[in-house]
Image (cartoon, grey):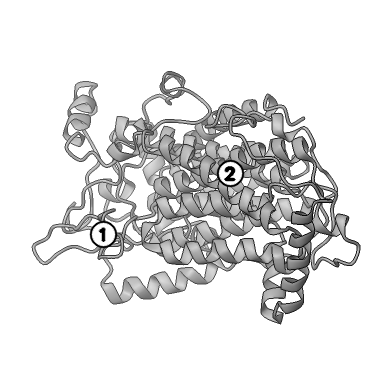
Amino acid sequence: MKHIHSAILLVSGFSLLALFTRCNKDIETPTYDAYPETSLDANAGTWKTYVVANGSAFAVPAPEDASSTAYQAELADLKAKMAAATAEQQNLARHWGANGVLRWHAIAREMAAQYNVPPNYNPDGTYPSPDPMNPTSYPRFPFANPPYASRAFALLAVAQYDALVTAWHHKFQYNRLAPYKNDATIRPLIPENDLPSYPSEDAVVAAASRELLKFLFPGEVAKINALAEEHKNSRLWAGANVQSDLDAGDSLGRIIATQVINYAKTDRMGMANNQAGFANQRADATARGITTQWHSLDIPVRAPMLPAYGNVKTWNLDQATLISLRPQAPPQPGTPDFETAINELRNMAKNRTREQFRIASYWADGVGSYTPPGHWNRKAAEYIHEKQLNEIRTARVMALMNTAIQDAGIACWDVKFYYLLPRPTEVDPNVTTCTGIPNFPAYTSGHSTFSAAAAEVLAYLFPDKAAEVQAMAKEAAESRIYGCIHYRFDSEIGLTHGKQIGAYGVLRGQSDGSQ
């Protein structure tokens, strides 16, 4: 079987770049306009947080009174900055004013896509490993594969959400209104609202996002810092905040991000690529009677992708619960049920329709893409803009969905490396794929599990979209059958498993105090 090549992983450097460039055309971010935030959510400072204890865990100094000499000087400085703002700066003010939370998620997706490139092999047949201490050297760190991307999006979302809950607590503690509410001569470039401006929600988001993304993508520090400064300055150009609003928000966002980064340093991701332990996983599977096991089809043989990712810490359920939800063993090669499944793929490989090929390609989310988790993040952003959710409601949506998606990925990888089921092409080389062969076991489908968890949470958050997201999850699952990447039972059980994992995200949302 070793002669079978993975179309994704064995392309040359030139063709890999071409593939990356082609896939990158699919990650363009839609343009959205700023909209008025009509819901203040004055009690949001009491909502349940993820990493910090609660919204009042960190103090913010009291601001100067709006009638003070110091604040009046800040207003004068703000008006001067607005008057001096260039056309480009005014456009940036409108750009960032259209929901800063989602702007940073779009940036994270773009970075994930840029770093979703597996390294090619060395002349001696070995594969180099990305080095976090030298992130810009080849191969760049990180390799933003689907598990890494799901964790990145979850950590970013949690940092933004916890930071905004804390900011909301202090906003309504001090209740200092926006500059245009204190000086009628200020005409902001973005829609007005009655939300207290101290500390600035945008500065909080900019700082929390900045620190998390620098931690996750250390080779992009200069770019990330520049974007954060642009985001904060945009509030001055827009007439939405004075400098002390921004300074307090930046300090608070940095503090909360540090807490989330400390959490990330202990979430067991550092051991997810434990290749030394993979031999034990094989031996354990053999002891359970699983003798026909998955092997890499790459030439040279590549180590499996993150074989211990199933041990990473989950957000919405504990490890014991995760294990209790592990699906039963799949049909084994040679059994009637397995033969039915692989015969379907043998036929699919020969008779795939144009529509099936289109669906397989649409959901491929492979090299150079922001992966299936990013696909669902973009869909959530569409719904958020359609509903015109405010910043903290936006952060809640992204945190609930992305923690569920990461939990689903952890659960799926636990299953994959527990059962070690061979890919269809390993069992029968005549089963050719149309999107490449992932370098990890078949059962269950990651696309299916990620998608079902995301759909479960989005159906709860946007009940009028429930039928749409559930149909999308089903199509994502079927796409892997059409591509001959997965057996039908991989996808169907993955959907069931992902829905179970997503339900724990829904339970958290139902008890977070936001209703």
Quadrant location of the C terminus in the rendered image? top right
Task: Please tell me whether mark 2 sits on a helix, a strand or a loop.
Answer: helix
Relative to 54, is 388 on the left or the right? right
Q: Is residue 484 visible?
A: no
Residue 123 position within the rendered picture, expressed as x and y whole percent measured from the top left: 11, 67
Is there any visible trace of residue 223 in the rendered image? yes
- Closer to the chain start, of discs 2 and 1, is 1
2 or 1: mark nearer the eye: 2
- Seen as rendered, the residue at the extreme left is 124
Residue 509 screen position, x and y as percent: 66, 30
Q: Amino acid at mark 1?
A: Asn
Task: Look at label 2 and name its amino acid.
Answer: Leu
Taking depth in this image into account, of 403 and 331 the one nearest to the observer is 403
Residue marked by disc 2: 252
Crowd rating for badge 1 (residues with CA inside 10 Å; few <14, some 14–19, many 20+): few
* 421 to 513, vertically: above or below: below
Residue sitting at 48 percent across and 62 percent down?
224
**Residue 442: horizontal and vertical position, in percent?**
35, 42
Res. 134 mark: 1
